Structures are given as structure tokens and as C-alpha cells.
Image (cartoon, rainbow, N blue to C red):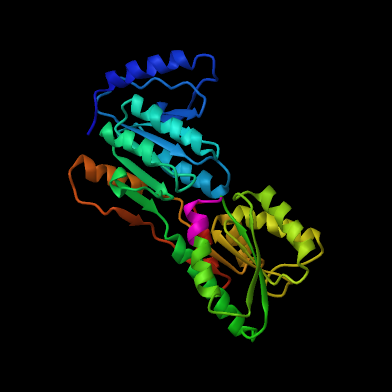
Amino acid sequence: MKKRLQFIIVGVLVLSLLFLASCGADFGVDGNAEQTDESADGDIPEREDLIVVGVCQVGSESVWRTANTESIQQTFTGENGYFLIFNNARQKQENQIKAVRRFISQKVDYIVISPITEDGWDTVLKEAQDAEIPVILMDRKVNVSDPGLYTAWVGSDFFLEGKNAGEWLEQYLEEKGMSEEEIYIVVLQGTEGSSAMIGRSKGFESVADKHKNWIILEKAGAEYTTAKAKEEMKRMLGKYPDINVVVSQNDDMTFGAIDAIEECGLTVGEEGDVILISFDAVYTALKLVEAGKIGVDVECNPLQGPYVESIIKALEYNWGFEKENYVPEQVFYKENVSEFLPDRKY
């Protein structure tokens, strides 16, 4: 699958001239090039034994995303036989599409995308297919007319994550003798149209719909960021004084929600005013689970680099592989979290 790197170098030099007026690319460890949506492209070394991988990341909006990026960068190194061209799309789909077209013009061997939203990918993925460059989706999925436009997907079962969160709340309320009481819920949702937002919402609602006494007051978009979540949480607290449960679709938003709740003079946790349900399970959040502030944190495993590499190796050696590949994940609550904290990598 490896292409002759001198062809890529010619494309890189041309693109570098075109982008000369823009800010330059940053170079990280092992000589890999990091691009923004406007940066010049870095030179690719004249080593025909390297597999060239172009990765387009959502951005750097959360602790989870940082861990996901580090997993990719630690996997696709020169020492491991790769040259990585990394693009940070800064939460804009148009930047991702530009990056994919740049990868195609550079004649990379593989393209890896973590799609910001599910829709709008048919045209550029067809361009990659016509160029005979395999596309591997990471973390999030796409909604396309032909599933053959991408080679494989690696990521989380977002529906199951949401369902697990709902089932934890179901069991918690039963244990507390609150299963028949009216429960007022608000939801802090992630990026509109993203796979995680869609899957976690549907999964949680599959449980909530069975309980007529679970009243979802509002679903507020908070973009997976702490600042936006704090803003939305403050607004909802002013609008709904009887909130019992906050479902926050990632840990960074949960941190913002906690700040807002406590600044309003309320408390969180088992003995507090508001029950918190979170997703991702980064170390800082798991410490809050251990302290009893977060009721449950459903893991979304960011360490996906090795799983993406396994697909590339399968393609290189003509091994069989699955189209959809789920990474292993767990559910953390106060009773089980302490045993996992010492070995937490993110």
C-alpha cells in the first residue's frame, strides 16, 4: 500500500508555495508534520519504507480529545514505520474537508478522520475512493449514501453508553426509594449532529421513555466545552428550580455544570441537591466519582490509535478485518472506581 514518497514531496513543495503567506506547520516528535486548516504542509522525508498517514482530528476541545490525539501521535511514529501528517480542524467541518482534499493531493497512503458531524461527507469521500486511498473513521461515524466510501470505523458504542447511563439512574433511584417520584432532568448535549451526541441521547432516552415520571425539562447544546456548559447550566438553573438530575454528555461539560451549580448555592452528589451523570471517564472526573460528586461516569475510551493501526496493518498484509470495530469500555461509580484510578492513563 505504500506509495513512492517522492511524488508526495513534489505535491508538498507545490502546496508549500501556495500557502507561503500563511502560518507554517508545527513539527512534533519523530519529524511528523502538524497542520492547521490554514498551515503550510511539512516536508515528507525520502524514505520509501514509511507508511504515510493523514489524520484529521476534530480539534482540542476537551481532555478526552487531547488523550485521543496523543494516542494517535504515539502510535504513528517514524520508529513504528509511519510518517504522520496531523491536522487540527478546530471544530469546523469545512476545515476537515479541506484537510482530506490536501491529503489526497499529497497522495498519502491512508486517511483517518474523526468526523465533526455525520452528514456532508459523500463528495470528498468519493474523491478519496477515486484516488484509491483507504479512509478509516475514528471515534465518530458518517451518514453516507454508500458505506463503501470508507474502509472501516473504530470507536465507541455511543448508544450503549447512553443506555448504560439510563440504567444506572434507574437502579440508583430504586435503591434510594425514589423510583416512583417525579424526576426532573436536564441534558447538556455535545456538538449538534455528532455521533456521540446522537448515540448518547438515543441510548439514555431508550431508558427514560419507560419511566413516565422522568421529565426531561430541556436539552441544551454546550459543544463539549466547560465554558459553554457552565453558561447553559446557570441559565437552566434560573429557569428550572427543581432540577434533580443533570446528564452531561462529556466530562468537560460536567466540570462546567458543577461550577454553575455550586456558584448557585446548591450541592452535587449522593447527599446533594443534584445527581450528575457524565461520560468519558477522564482521571479528574473519576476522582470526583470517588469523592461522591459525580454519580456515574460512562467510559468513552480515547486510546484508539492502536485499533486504527490494526486496520492499516490488516490492509498492508491483506488480513481480514471488521468494518465496525468497538473499543472496550466500562462504567464507573463510587463502589468500583478506586481500583481503576492508579492505572488511569488519561
Q: Nearer the viewer, residue 211 or 40?
A: 211
Q: Answer above or below: position of 90 versus 247.
A: above
Residue 198 forms part of the magenta stretch? yes
Which residue appears farthest toward the front when viewing the image?
A: 145
Is residue 80 at all visible to an observer of this figure? no
Q: Main secondary structure of the magenta part?
A: helix
Residue 344 forms part of the magenta stretch? no
Which quadrant of the figure has residue 265?
bottom right
**Which residue is depicted at the point 40% across and 47% down?**
138
Which residue appears farthest toward the left when viewing the image?
A: 318
Left or right of 144? Residue 20 is right
Q: Nearer the viewer, residue 161 or 27?
A: 161
Q: Nearer the viewer, residue 28 or 307?
A: 307
Left or right of 112? Residue 133 is left
* Region of the chain picked out in magenta, as a range: 192-199
Where residue 98 sits: x, y (%)?
45, 30
**Which residue is depicted at the point 52% across and 20% down?**
24
**Which residue is depicted at the point 44% across and 37% down?**
56
Quadrant the N terminus occupies: top left
Where residue 205 sits: x, y (%)?
53, 69
Where residue 318 sits: x, y (%)?
17, 44
Please give the count of numbered marks on the rendered protein.
0
Where residue 266 sits: x, y (%)?
78, 66
Is residue 191 at all visible to an observer of this figure? yes
Which residue appears farthest toward the right when viewing the image?
A: 265
**Which residue is depicted at the point 53% across and 63% down?**
201
Q: Answer above or below: position of 65 versus 48.
A: below
